[in-house]
Image (cartoon, rainbow, N blue to C red):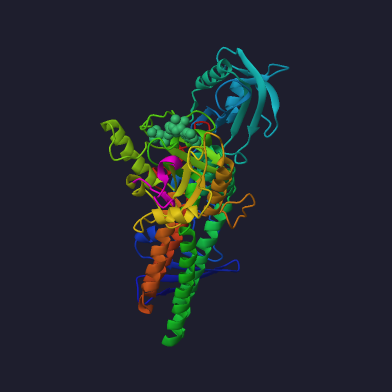
Amino acid sequence: MLRPWSSCSITTLSVRHVGRSYSLNVFPTPVFLKFTPSIPRRNSTHSHSLLPYPYPSPVHANHVNGPGVHMDPFRGPTPSDAQRRTIYALSTPPGKGGVAVIRVSGPHASKVWKAVTRSVRTCATNKVPVPWVAELREVIDPVTREKLDVGLVLFFKGPKSFTTEDVLELQVHSGRAVLSSVLQALSKLPYCRPAQAGEFTRRAFEGGRLDLTQVEGLRDLIDAETEVQRRVAVNGASGIQRARFDALRAQILECLMYIEGFIDFGEDIDELGQEEMFEQARIRAQEIIKCIHLHLSDNRRGEILRTGIKLAIFGPPNAGKSSLFNFLAERDAAIISPIPGTTRDVLSLTLDIGGLPVVLNDTAGIRQRAVDVIEKIGVERAGDVVVASDVSICVLSLEEVVSRTVEGDLQIQIPADVINHLKPDTIFLFNKSDLALDTSSGDFLGLLKRSIPPTVPATMPKLWKISLHTGVGTQEFLDGLASFLKERYAFSETMSLDDSPLVTQARHRDYLKSAVRHLEEFKSFPLSQIDIAAESLRYAARAIGAVSGLDVSTEEVLGAIFSSFCVGK
Ligand SMILES: Nc1nc2c(ncn2[C@@H]2O[C@H](COP(=O)(O)OP(=O)(O)OP(=O)(O)O)[C@@H](O)[C@H]2O)c(=O)[nH]1
């Protein structure tokens, strides 16, 4: 059924096919195609499909649009077999070891198998590889026929392989000479070339094996150094994160379907009823906005857990900052000396504290009167590090800052330069308790709070008293710091899926914000402009889809993601 939609330039086509209803809104301009990317345009170069019901899986795959030409619905044509070279790279770390894996992927992988491997028993090379069966074979030079090594050889027939192409894995001994001879042998094959960073994963993405959240998850899994990083990355790599984004997108599409149905049949309803129905859709959109805001207001938890919590150690010179840095690092990473102003630059290292990744920064002692220009720069850098940190620890020497008044009461005097760098949740570490007068009696926390001017936002200071020399109080501090971080970043050893962060990349955050903008836009349209309002919903769905890689066509975005991989992945 084709009928014109009176108030706008959309023609609505209602179709029933194999028991399913489709509402096809056709824009009479080529811009229409730009507006309607949310549904894969299967086997068609001029599709008008806006909203098939039920909504098809967003998992994209190459669709053959003619002999040898693969058409990705969102990225246009991908190279055919003839255009695509077979790539190879070492997939395990270089160096001495039991086994190294050299991976080959592309249309000529079976040719490579024939060229560089032969039977251990018969030395025959003219067999066809049996897919998914490990076979012990000689690895040879394709030109000289010299035996280079003996190893397990595995052939994966595409599309049942990581890249969805034919893949060959050569498991050889991991030694510098073996690896270089095998890689050199592969370079002699004219149909092969070395892989670029992330190229195997990129081919897996282009083949529809992985979406972008899985690609990012895979990269993070390889880079994961702590338990929490592994958990967050596994959610991404296994597709759990994508499913959560898909669920969000499905909610928007549901709202869009409601509006589409309304556009189709709404004219039979009186104006009051129409207003009421549109209001229902606005309420739905508001619920989705609320849900997205919940994810956006997570203090960048996912990004921080993924990249590491930036922890700054700051304070006056000679307080024991570098001593703390070394204590946490469990090695002599920084120079320690009794000379104030020893640390000049920012020192960084990555640590695991209670399963959480922490990027620890030691900084120059903050003082107004720096002895020279280099120390002055160091102090400026210290300030910048504190500002950019997620958590900051102010180290003070108890001996220096605590004294008694003439009345005999304890008093704390924090240097003014340091006070300027305090944040609402700064952690105070009072060091050198072995040298200081007894501070155990009385309300030390209350005393600390009173010593901070009311203009400074250190509303909830946490404090520990320790001696990095004698070790007194250090274990309590370590345990306390770990619990503080776990609580703050909502991490527990039994973290459930619902507790794990949805947004793990700045890219995800941008797309979610964009979806919110379009949903707000949708809500702002009056009933008379319902067709334009529907457009905003489509944009919102499109923004969420872009997180998984639907409709991400810019080489810039893809290049940035894949280039952060190592060669061989
Ligand atoms: N008695 C005592 N001395 C300590 C303690 N912690 C550190 N020190 C000493 O204090 C001096 C300064 O320590 P650092 O760790 O270099 O201090 P810092 O804050 O990094 O100093 P700057 O580099 O000047 O900013 C060194 O001689 C340390 O051995 C402690 O708990 N007790």
Residue 266, relative to residue 57: is it above or below? below
Question: Can see residue 410?
Answer: yes
Residues 295 and 569: in front is 295
Task: Kindly tell me whether residue 198 is visible in this rendering.
Answer: no
Most distant residue in the front direction: 407
Residue 407 at x, y percent in the picture: 41, 53
Residue 498: name its quadrant. bottom right
- The magenta span reads 397-415
The location of residue 437, given as percent across then percent down, is 48, 43
The image shows residue 331 at horizontal and vertical percentages of 52, 29
Q: Looking at the image, which residue is at 68% across and 34% down?
A: 132
Left or right for 550, reference 492: left
Q: Is residue 97 left or right of residue 1?
A: right
Q: Is residue 188 above or below residue 255?
A: above
453 or 398, which is in the foreground?
Answer: 398
Query: Is residue 89 inside the magenta stretch?
Result: no
Where in the figure is residue 276, as x and y percent of width and height? 45, 82
The relative height of residue 478 versus residue 135 in the rendered view (above or below) is: below
User: Residue reaching furthest right?
Assistant: 121
Q: Residue at x 38, y 48 (%)?
A: 413
In this view, the residue in front, 411 or 162, is 411
Query: Is 407 a magenta residue?
Result: yes
User: Hey, which quadrant is residue 330 in on the image?
Assistant: top right
As drawn, the residue found furthest toward the left would be 373
Foreground residue, 444 or 303?
Answer: 444
Which quarter is ligand 1 in?
top left
Total numbered badges shown on the rendered structure: 0
